[in-house]
Image (cartoon, rainbow, N blue to C red):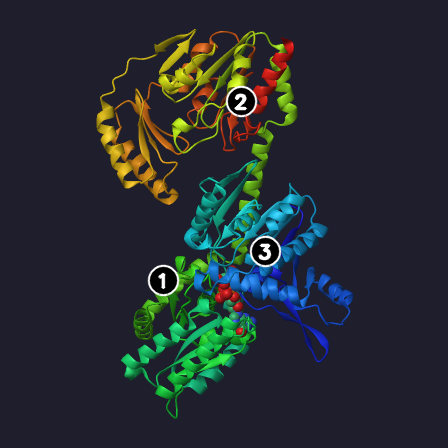
Amino acid sequence: MEKTIIVSNRLPVTLSRKDNKVVFTPSPGGLATGLAGASKDMNSVWIGWAGFALDGFHDNIEEIKLNLEKQRLIPIFLNEEDVNQFYEGFSNTTLWPLFHSFPTYTSCHEDQWEVYQKVNEIFCEEVLKHAGEDDLIWIHDYHLLLLPGLIRKKLPKAKIAYFQHIPFPSYEIFRILPWREQILEGVTGADLVGFHTHDDVKHFLTSIQRILGMENKMGTVRAEERIFKVDAFPLGIDYYKYREMSMLKSTERQVGLHRKQFQDVKIILSIDRLDYTKGIPERLKAFDIFLEKNPEFREKVSLLMIVVPSREKVQLYKNLKMEIDEMVGNITSKYRTVNWTPVLYFYRSYPLQSLSAFYKLSDVALITPLRDGMNLVCKEYVASRNDESGVLILSEMAGAAKELSDALIINPYNVEECANAIKTALCMPLDEQKRRMSEMQYLLAKYDVSKWTTIFLKSMEEIVQKQEELAMKRLTPELKHKVISDFNSSKKRILFLDYDGTLVSFQNRPEHAKPDKDLYEIMSRLCATQNLKVVIISGRNKATLSEWFGHFDMDIIAEHGLWMRRDNNWKMMFQLNDDWKKELSTILNLFVEKTPGSFVEEKDHSLVWHYRKADDDLSNARKKELLDYLQYLTTNMGLSVLEGNKVVEIKSALINKGRAVKKYLKAPFDFILAAGDDWTDEDMFKEMPEHAYTIKIGSSLSAAKYTLPQYIQGVNSGIRTILSDIAEKTQKLF
Ligand code: GDG
């Protein structure tokens, strides 16, 4: 890839005005800190909002642009109204609370949504000015959820990655959003979608499955003509930067000064942006309970609480600030002595080195968000503890808790538990502190931010490569042309056509997927074509297939090859013992009871568990359970267990589509076409001679030479485009 275009709401520097001059300061928050580390090793440019509203700003914009360009930064300028509606509005009063699972704080306003769309389009225009064919466009966070889709529409071949720094909520919460389809259509324009944790990945996959009907296999999602990948990439920090900074003489000097001031009082540290997701009132409550229950710790420990101003224009944040001020006031007045202040509260931001001194100074870090995508502060604390002392108390609701299991993990809503953890931390023996701290340091050093970038970019390369492999196999219009002309110029021709998922699209119940008028028309023309044998090859039973296709002059293979109708004669290909069915149907019925919406279909010589209509999460869990169970039960029974499209089928191992088609291939056909959509069709593809056209319907990997998208009901699409062309040409011959 040529260069990386990073796109985020904010540039890593924020512009503001001081004494009538434009000043550049580092942007606050985790995205800027995290990505600044990631971007330094890359050939990148960074597009983002300049951080101030354009209105009334008379400075020379061109000069500002030039200045930023030198740092490879490209500013986007927004007017005040847009900033209000897009940033303070839709991003921070709709998406932020909803994505952090605070639906009651979520407000939905159509006018803010309009501006959100408009600003995403402004970003899209700017990206298009800079994006070359081979560039990677790497979009960050919830302010730009529509951007991947917008770029995809303009540049269909662009390489687009999206990473979300905040959580993705469960489907039950996400579905509240009135614009849920549009938002998901935006994100799914990317080739790679990344989150911090597997829970977020799972939630996102469930939402796109439920809302957009997109299925996935191990995180690889099929979206009509494309595939894209969804995965977890827990963000790391620039570990050695924090470690080295904490060892600087100047940092140690600051620590020494603080120590002198605090004397023997132990320090518990918390640092957050002002936000209701960070659990600040709950933390203060826990500290209050701790002091109440453990009077012996009064005058011996203080909470050093740094709250960094953020989103001060939003009313909820103003209220939160007042609540915190009041709580700190209450605790202070309740416990304070002449020599001791229980809560050292600072509402401001500090230079990085001062933070480093605080990290190094503090005996305990108390990081208790109610919900947090990752949380970098806890990682920075761990990295700064170069003598391996110190205890981290960490909320289980932070993404970081998945990695830092050696912290004291607490539920931040359980203030009693948190109060107890404070005591445990303060009393923890030094050797245990060191054991836990060194484990966490080992992990953070290994998975630092540059490793994160490498892993993310590698995943991007992998998915692009997979897409290319699939694209190479796609049956293009030119290739379709060749299929038809080969068909026309050959003398002995045969078509092997799977039914469900190939000739027709799936329905909730198998009996609803009947052939439609259009398919019958195609079939009757194909069957009337000279020197052409049409074979339907399906897992369905012979009664159904006879009813639907019996009147055509065609061959039919039913139940994956157990039954064959050749020259109008049904014949069973093997003698089978079906004694196993009784025992296994009892088990399958048990799974039906445990999985509402699923049902068992009994065929002559096989059993099928269908779960298309069942809840996705539940049925996936049940399916795994069932497959494990069957594997153990069916050993030495001569049965095979097939996982099809939302079905699990158990049948004799003797029956497979490959064996069935072999019977035809003894004769010399100069034109062969075989099409199928699931892995029962793979046996058929593998038996086909080199000159056959084998076509996999859908885009997962297969032994077939080509792929075609699925048939969409009512539209001339999928394999029907070829069949109707063959049929049409044939008609002209008559
Ligand atoms: C979002 C997600 C996710 C804080 N105070 C000062 C200061 N900071 C720096 C910290 C840290 C960053 O800001 C805060 O990052 P967090 O991760 O803790 O939180 P968010 O800002 O909410 O970040 C979060 C993150 O994105 C990354 O993906 O982890 O879950 O919400 O680096 O050190 N920096 C300076 N002065 C301060 O006073 N210089």
Residue 433 shown left or right of residue 190 in the figure: left
Q: Judge whether residue 264 can be spotted in this image.
A: no
Q: Judge whether residue 461 can be spotted in this image.
A: yes
**Tag in front: 1 or 2:** 2
Report how many numbered discs are placed on residues in the image.
Answer: 3
Residue position for label 1: 406
522 w.r.t. 181: above or below = above
112 w.r.t. 568: above or below = below
- Please provide percent x and percent y for residue 194: 51, 51
Q: Are marks 3 and 1 in contact (CB under 8 Å)?
A: no
What amino acid is found at the position of numbered circle 1 in the picture?
A: Asp
What amino acid is found at the position of numbered circle 3 in the picture?
A: Leu
Going from N to C along the chain, the mark reached first, 3 or 1, is 3
Question: Is the CB of mark 2 within 8 Å of ligand 1?
Answer: no
Going from N to C along the chain, the mark reached first, 1 or 2, is 1
Residue position for label 2: 518
The residue lying toward the viewer, choosing from 483 and 507, is 507
- Please provide percent x and percent y for residue 32: 58, 63
The residue lying toward the viewer, choosing from 723 and 520, is 520
**Tag in front: 2 or 3:** 2
